[in-house]
Image (cartoon, rainbow, N blue to C red):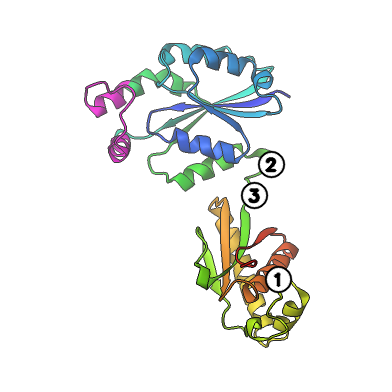
Amino acid sequence: MGARLVLITGLSGSGKSSVAKAFEDLGYYTVDNLPLPLLARFVAEPLELVPGHRRIAVVADVRAPGFGDQFPALVRGIDRTAVEPTLLFLEASDEVLVRRFSETRRPHPLADDGPLIEAIRRERELLADLRGSADLVFDTSEWSIHEIRSEVYRGFAGREGAPSMVVSLVSFGFKHGIPYGTDLLFDVRFLPNPQWVPELREHTGQEEPVRRYLAEQPDFAELLTRLTDLLLYLLPRYRQENRSYVSVAIGCTGGRHRSVTVAEALGERLEEAGWPARVIHRDVAR
């Protein structure tokens, strides 16, 4: 079987960059805005030019000189015995495109010195035949970035499915600051502090004496059960929203004892439930 080749094109401002990023997340080798002579060679020999990649996405649009005349012929000339091509066309309403260009303050590729709306309509007319020959058309007028990702995943994930979500459990000490990029934060400072037990002070929450001490505390088991239940409720819902990462921060005073033990125990419970998590101890060595 040849490579799967997705050709992404459409109106300027319709979301091609967001779509390209979604394909990257799915593991596609993605290229953007190649000059047409290079693009012709690329789609003719993708496996030779990017060996080891059998899923490829290419963004091409009116930024390339001669696009309107040459790109349709390039698509028709693809050797379908070597690649499995899909032409994906993106569009949006004139009103939405005007708003997007106004918000980003970027120039339209065909604007020259004329009004923006005239450039949008000229591009729409220029690409009308290409739209008609597309295998799939996305109208992104009412779509958020998350909805664009969902549509790409739904149409192109295939057997591999959507990319897995990375779950991180980060222990930390409040006196050193809250970790950047935290999605969920739990404060476990209500547990007795091993720091004030002389024989435990030099140990960390990764070591058995501290783990055993905390496991003997009346609230510890219930805390783990409640946190595990909450995460097992939330994580599938984050994944439905196509989140790539979820960072769960667990804090105590110094980040060496209680938060470390709780993060380790939570990681074990999530692993048992089928949610592998990266456990990171930010402050354990301080």
- Characterize the local packing of mark 2: few (<14), some (14-19) or many (20 or more) Cα atoms within 10 angstroms: few
Q: Position of residue 208 (x, y in %)?
A: 77, 76
Structural distance between the alpha carbons of marks 1 and 3: 22 Å
Type of amino acid at the residue the image marks with label 3: Ser
Give the extent of the magenta segment. 95-122
| Residue assigned mark 2 | 160
Type of amino acid at the residue the image marks with label 2: Glu
| Residue assigned mark 1 | 265
Residue at (62% x, 57% y) in the render: 167
Note whether 96 is above or below 72 in the view shown: below
Structural distance between the alpha carbons of marks 2 and 1: 30 Å
Structural distance between the alpha carbons of marks 3 and 2: 10 Å
Of helix, strand and loop, which one carries label 1?
helix
Horizontal side of residue 129 vs 234, given as left or right = left
Type of amino acid at the residue the image marks with label 1: Ala
Dividing the picture into quarters, in which one does residue 227 lie?
bottom right
Dividing the picture into quarters, in which one does residue 132 lie?
top left
